[in-house]
Amino acid sequence: MPSNIAEGQGRLSKKEFKHFLSLARGSLLEVETQVLIAADLHYLSSDIAHDLETQTHEVLRIINALMDSLVC
């Protein structure tokens, strides 16, 4: 996810940056899914899974706001 953001920042247009933010958003949602699976399989406690889910929602909010701020 951070690599997608960095790569997008290095591109020459806002449209390309927004595309890479979209990829980062998808990667974040994949991570969230893996956290939920890990919790279901009892690899993570429910408290840790909840904390991670809260953090992913905050990062998702930030990415969405950044995407919304880019006028292409």
Image: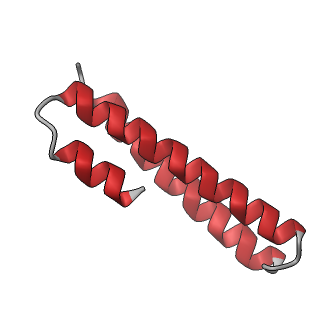
For image coordinates 47% across by 55% down, the residue present is: 59
Q: Quadrant of the N terminus?
A: bottom left
Q: Residue furthest left?
A: 12
Q: Position of residue 55 (x, y in %)?
A: 56, 64
Q: Position of residue 31 (x, y in %)?
A: 61, 58
| Left or right side of 19 for 61 | right
**66, above or below 28, in the image:** above
Left or right of residue 3: residue 25: right
Quadrant position of residue 18: top left
The residue that appears at 34% across and 39% down in the rendered structure is: 20
Q: Seen in the image, is 11 located left or right of residue 18? A: left
Say left or right for 28 vs 8.
Answer: right
> Quick check: can you spot residue 64?
no
Instruction: Give percent across and percent down for residue 42.
Output: 88, 77
Rendered residue at 31%/50% (across/down): 5
Residue drawn where x is 16% and y is 39% of the image: 11
- Which quarter of the figure has residue 36? bottom right
Res 28 seen here: yes
Compared to residue 47, the image places residue 52 above or below, namely above
Instruction: Count numbered badges in the picture.
Output: 0
Toward which corner of the image does residue 45 lie, by quadrant?
Answer: bottom right
The relative height of residue 48 versus residue 23 in the rendered view (above or below) is below
Identify whether 46 is placed above or below 63: below
Is the C terminus in the top left, top right, bottom left or bottom right quadrant?
A: top left
Instruction: Pick whichever, 59 or 14, lies toward us.
Output: 14
Where does residue 14 sit, x and y in percent of width and height? 20, 29
